[in-house]
Amino acid sequence: MNNTVFLNSLRFVLLILAQVLIFNAMNFMDSINPLVYVIFFYWYPIKGNRTLFMLISFLLGFMVDIFSDTMALNAIASLTVAYARPVIMRFCFGVNYEFQNFSFKNTTKVQRITFMALLILIHQLVFFSLEILSFAHILLILKKVFATGLVTLVLCTLFSSLFSPTSE
């Protein structure tokens, strides 16, 4: 248990630093800014305390907001993803994820990528809907969601394959 807490704390800090120092400085085509800290929601233990997870998710988004000057958009989007995570897991993995012996190792790569893509999609939808805050610009919102979401998904998939924990 102590090892899990240390590992999640290290991930928390490193993802904030990576997002703030590296990925916030990147702007592909002047509008695509990948939000790779979303992979934290993928890596967080399945059977973890849900209340603690919601609090950590809020703090993660809030810390990124402080350094990015985005007025709590990341905090709201992160909290929404943390709240919706069990529903997304049930959609991607079925009721199997509720059993004690469930592990990502027992799932297919398609299920894991679908899970990550849905986490990113929900995060991006909430983030850009609140950033633009106008249904008159729905095409701009969708363009930003899909462009940024695709780049974020590619980077998160690479991170997941490179830094994937041995026991989930």
Image: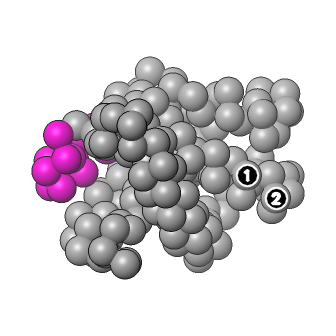
Query: Which dot marks residue 110?
Result: 2
Q: Which residues are magenta?
A: 58-71
Q: Is residue 59 magenta?
A: yes
Q: Residue at x 39, y 43 (%)?
A: 137
Please determine whether, in this image, residue 53 is positioned above or below residue 30: above
Q: Residue 100 is drawn in which quadrant?
A: top right
Label 1 Cα crowd, 10 Å radius (few <14 / some 14-19 / many 20+): some
* Prevailing secondary structure of the magenta residues: helix
Residue 136 image position (x, y, % from top left):
39, 37
SS at mark 2?
Answer: helix
Q: As shown in the figure, which amino acid type bears the numbered disc 1?
A: Thr
Marks 1,2: beta carbons within 8 A: yes
Q: Residue at x 85, y 33 (%)?
A: 94
Q: Left or right? Give the position of 101 relative to 118.
A: right
Q: Nearer the viewer, residue 81 or 55?
A: 81
Closer to the camera, 9 or 17? 17
Q: Position of residue 168 (x, y in %)?
A: 67, 51
- 61 and 71: which one is in front? 71
- Residue under the image location 81 percent in, 39 percent down: 93
Judged from this view, the residue extending furthest toward the front is: 136
Residue 35 percent location from the top left of the image? 40, 59
In the picture, measured across the screen, residue 87 lies left or right of residue 64, that is: right
The residue under label 1 is 114
Q: Position of residue 43 (x, y in %)?
A: 56, 51
Q: Is residue 115 visible?
A: yes
Q: Which residue type carries mark 2?
A: Val
When the figure is inspected, residue 89 is found, relative to residue 118, above or below; the finding is above
What residue do we see at 73% from left, 52% from top? 114
Along the viewing direction, whichever of 107 and 8 lies nearer the viewer: 107
Q: Is residue 25 magenta?
A: no
- 3D distance between C-alphas at marks 1 and 2: 6 Å
Task: Say the numbered circle drawn on residue 74.
Answer: none
